[in-house]
Amino acid sequence: MKDCIFCKITKGEIPSRTIYEDDQIKVIMNINPSTNGHLLVLPKEHMENIFDTKEEVIMHSIKIVKERIYPGLKEKLHCEGLTLAQNNELGQEIKHYHIHLILRYSNDNADFAYDKEHLEEVEEIYNRLK
């Protein structure tokens, strides 16, 4: 895709702070991080979202995060956890499949907390889905 910023980054047309790269993916620093060390995993081939991304690319991305990236993050940045986030369609600013690696620290402000006030809504949705 000609105008895709992530395609330009993976091709080296736009500079990035690359942490890891192989023939399938490039892992870069997010320029608008949620927490210190927030990274993006970008496939080199343009695919819009998870629904049209090749399964082998998804599996390769997760394997690299699990075996290489996360151990390095723990060692170098002393993070205490990792949140993986991946948007599709609504909420997807750049229409190029990518995974956010949001490093977690006990003192970060990332809020993924459980909200007990919505239990009735959860139960209602559960009943509709089962």
Image (tube, grey):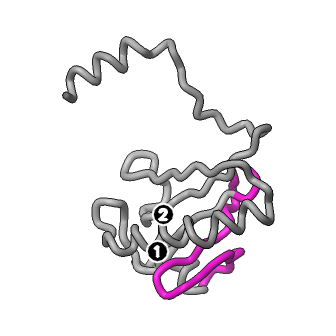
Residue under the point 49% across and 54% down:
93
Secondary structure character of the magenta stretch overall? loop
Looking at the rendered structure, the secondary structure element under dot 1 is strand
Residue under the point 58% across and 49% down:
83
The location of residue 95, given as percent across then percent down, is 42, 62
- 14 and 58: which is toward the camera: 58
Amino acid on which the number 1 mark rests in the picture: Pro
Q: Quadrant of the C terminus?
A: top left
Amino acid on which the number 2 mark rests in the picture: His
Total numbered badges shown on the rendered structure? 2
Q: Quadrant of the N terminus?
A: bottom left
Do the residues under discs 1 and 2 have CB atoms within 8 angstroms?
yes
Q: Quadrant of residue 126?
A: top left
Work out how far the residue at label 1 is from the one at label 2, CA to CA, in angstroms.
7 Å
Q: Which residue is mark 2?
A: 98
Residue range corresponding to the magenta coloring: 13-37
The location of residue 113, given as percent across then percent down, is 59, 28
Q: Which residue is mark 1?
A: 43
Q: Is residue 11 left or right of residue 30?
A: left
Q: Quadrant of residue 127?
A: top left
